Amino acid sequence: MEHFCKSAYTADGFLQLPSAPKNGFTLILKGYPSGVRQTILERARDAAEEDCELRYDACGGLTMVTDTARGLCVLDGTYPCAGDAQTYGVTDRLFDLSAFLHGGDLRDQAQRVRTLLEEIRREERRCAGYLQTCAGILGAGKRIAAEYTDAAKLNRFCASFWKKHGQPPCGRIGTLHTVFGTALKGSGIGRCDRLFGTLCDDILVIRDWAGNAADPIIEKLGLYARSSGLDVLACADILRPSQTPEHLLIPAMRLGIYRGRDGERTPFPVCRRIRAKRFLTREPTEQERHRASFSKKAYAELLTEASRSVRRILDLRHALDLVYLPYFDSAACLAAVDNLIKKC
């Protein structure tokens, strides 16, 4: 089984990374309660045969189960997740949970539902604002450090490392797969430690808070790997999801490049440690050190506030479920889903 985090709250809002198209039938779940959607996904997982791929959101909830042996994909298509039918009954189908609601009775709760949904969107905007400020702090720190970072030395290090440990070009371009390696959870910050522990024997940890050294290394080693025909797994950064990945894994080489923060402990065995200081042309001035220290404290506080917003979003979703559950026929819904899964 493969376990990847493909959706998370980022500085650009809730982002769901695209998944590779699957051959077979797709069942798209729409509607509330969200707990019932999770139960359906768990049943699809339990009914799956040996070859099964699982996709999770940042908080550990299932968002997609793909049983490749049977050609069946069950995915969550309800906000904030996205999923729409393309052929409407031919290769995919919408499964609307609202068909199992006692709609007449639920109308009395319309104002409560609208209020909860608006509060969820307000917390999502607040979370994105905190993360955007964090991204601005990191960007400012990177611009300052770039003034005394030796780019030529970074290029020489990357070329030397790949010449010693990599493979020569083979005329084929490797594939780039993207997941989230770090994501906000209600209980704090979740990291991709399991990915590195499972896919890597050799891990290169680069101690670099702002990324002025880690970003070029990750970017260049990723390009070297793909030019050698190796597939690359990139862990997108929630602060800048469309830019340089936060971490990089090359499964064919069992190699991982992990960008560590200053003072952060890595829970897996480390074969090499590199500090960004070795690529500096001079030591930071006292003023620059004070500025960096203040920025790190502000960054940590803002991340904590963003995590609290995610916790609040989860609580609001739970409150929304409590509104829907008394009016929902769970037994009929799950029986209908089980029947659909068996037919596929």
Image (tube, rainbow, N blue to C red):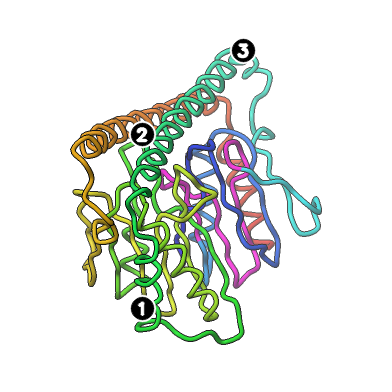
Q: Which residues are magenta?
A: 54-81
The local secondary structure at tag 1 comes to: helix
Task: Tell me the CA gap for discs 1 and 2.
Answer: 40 Å
Reply yes or no: does residue 75 show up in magenta.
yes
Q: Position of residue 194 (x, y in %)?
A: 33, 61
Q: Closer to the camera: disc 3 or disc 1?
A: 1
The local secondary structure at tag 3 comes to: helix
Q: Give above or below for 259 relative to 298.
A: below
Q: Position of residue 103 (x, y in %)?
A: 67, 23
Identify the residue under disc 3: 108
The amino acid marked with disc number 1 is Ser
Q: Position of residue 118 (x, y in %)?
A: 56, 19
Q: Give above or below for 5 relative to 170.
A: above
Q: Closer to the camera: disc 2 or disc 3?
A: 2
Label disc, if present, on residue 160 of the rendered structure: 1
Identify the residue under disc 2: 307
Label disc, if present, on residue 74 of the rendered structure: none
Q: Earlier in the sequence, mark 1 or mark 2?
A: 1
User: Which one is nearer the viewer's eye here, 105 or 296?
Assistant: 296
